[in-house]
Amino acid sequence: MEFRPVCFLDEARRRIYPLTMNQNLNDIMPDQTSPTGSTSRRKFLKTSTAAALGGAFVANLGLSGKGFAADGNTVKVGLIGCGGRGNGAAADALAADSNTVLYAMGDIDAAKIEVGLREVAKSVSDPSRIQVPAERRFVGLDAYQKVIASGVDVVLLTTPPGFRPQHFQAAVAAGKHAFLEKPIATDAAGVRSVRASAEEAKRKGLAVQSGFCWRANTSRTEFFKRLHDGAIGEVRSLYHTYLTGPVKPMPSASERPAGMSDVEWQIRNWYNFVWLCGDGLVEQAIHSIDKMIWAMKDLPPLKCTAVGGRQTPNHDGNIYDHIEVNYEWANGVRGFMAQRQIAGCHIEAKDYITGTKGIGCLGSRRGAEFTGDKTWHYEGPETDSQMFG
């Protein structure tokens, strides 16, 4: 039987567990608001744009603290994985504090590094903050090791998530602070590895931050605060949708360059392989599951049942194009997650929470409201849309 992960990977709250594991990792991750050694943490939400990305992590480290950077001033950032998300995280890290510099980059594709350099350079007015000469541009599956060993202070881990546990383990072993893009693993073995690395990170006093954006979004933060204060009474059911088109369609085998290995072909088309992406539920709809468990005050469910399959042809790869999961909590609350990635269908990414006194609804962007005994609609300032990349 093929394994498919149906788990919570709640990185933004530094809690990582499959459905059968209820341990709270807040107890083993570094405190992001209090001093660790000589590093004085800055306020977690320094800026709304950077808050859920690489910049939030860097802003949160206390960059002026002596002992964080080797020279007591400049923070050297290493980027591992130079795709769109990685380049964005690097740009956000540089925007978060003027003491940061991009110091090293690694990817399996040299061309991606060059594109990444150009993209990140567009985000800074001072070109001296891009300090990645040819000798610190590392190519290959072992590039992560070379970036970590290059003298950086912080690593941004933004490769396909199947590699995240291995890269995080290496970063912690080397004593590097780390930003982990979501998701942090694609299977149960990876989750256990990250848990072990998290324990070691705390022991070493390292800072670790991840890329769940909604926990830093202004309207969502206000929505869940009011929800937990009883805006719609007790939560009784949850229904979340993540219905989109294909994310990275698999190309035809005829487009595969001659001589390219199976491993490289799969990595270049990583989204289509479960071992690399975790399928659409873990790689994309995990945002919706994060909001589901947020609504339940971060209490994990007892169990779940799930169905899924593929209705549309695929040249290769083994991901499904639709998955539906039903979660059940100890108090009888049910949560329903509908995820689909099929072209030409209804598009929707919403969250519906039914309580004893009303209903809460979150739209894909600004929509955040309650109806019922009390009505409310969020009308305040909104987090920059850059966070939704």
Image: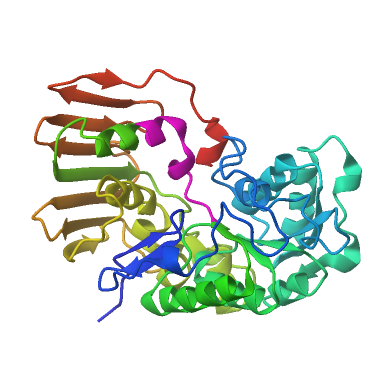
For residue 115: magenta?
no
**Is residue 101 positioned above or below 133 on the image?**
above
Q: Quadrant of residue 91?
A: top right
For the residue pair 66 and 321, the one nearer the viewer reads as 66
Q: Quadrant of residue 18?
A: bottom left
Q: Position of residue 56 (x, y in %)?
A: 61, 46
Q: Is residue 114 above or below residue 265?
A: above
* Residue 263 quadrant: bottom right
Q: Nearer the viewer, residue 253 or 167?
A: 167
Q: Nearer the viewer, residue 316 or 16?
A: 16
Place of residue 324 in the rendered image (x, y in percent of width and height, measured from the top left): 21, 55
**Residue sitting at x 14%, y 35%:** 233
- 4 relative position to 201: left or right: left
What secondary structure prevails in the magenta region? helix
Instruction: Find residue 329 and report its horizontal and vertical position in percent.
Output: 15, 58
Residue in the image at 8% along x and 55% along y: 332
| Image side of residue 351 versus residue 53, left or right | left
Q: Which residue is painted at 23% across and 26% down in the image?
A: 370
- The quadrant of the image that shows the N terminus is bottom left
Residue 208 can be seen in this image: yes
Up-down relation of residue 263 to residue 326 (above or below): below
- The percent position of residue 259, horizontal first and vertical second, equals 65, 77
Above or below, 202 relative to 53: below
**What range of the chain is rendered magenta?**
210-222
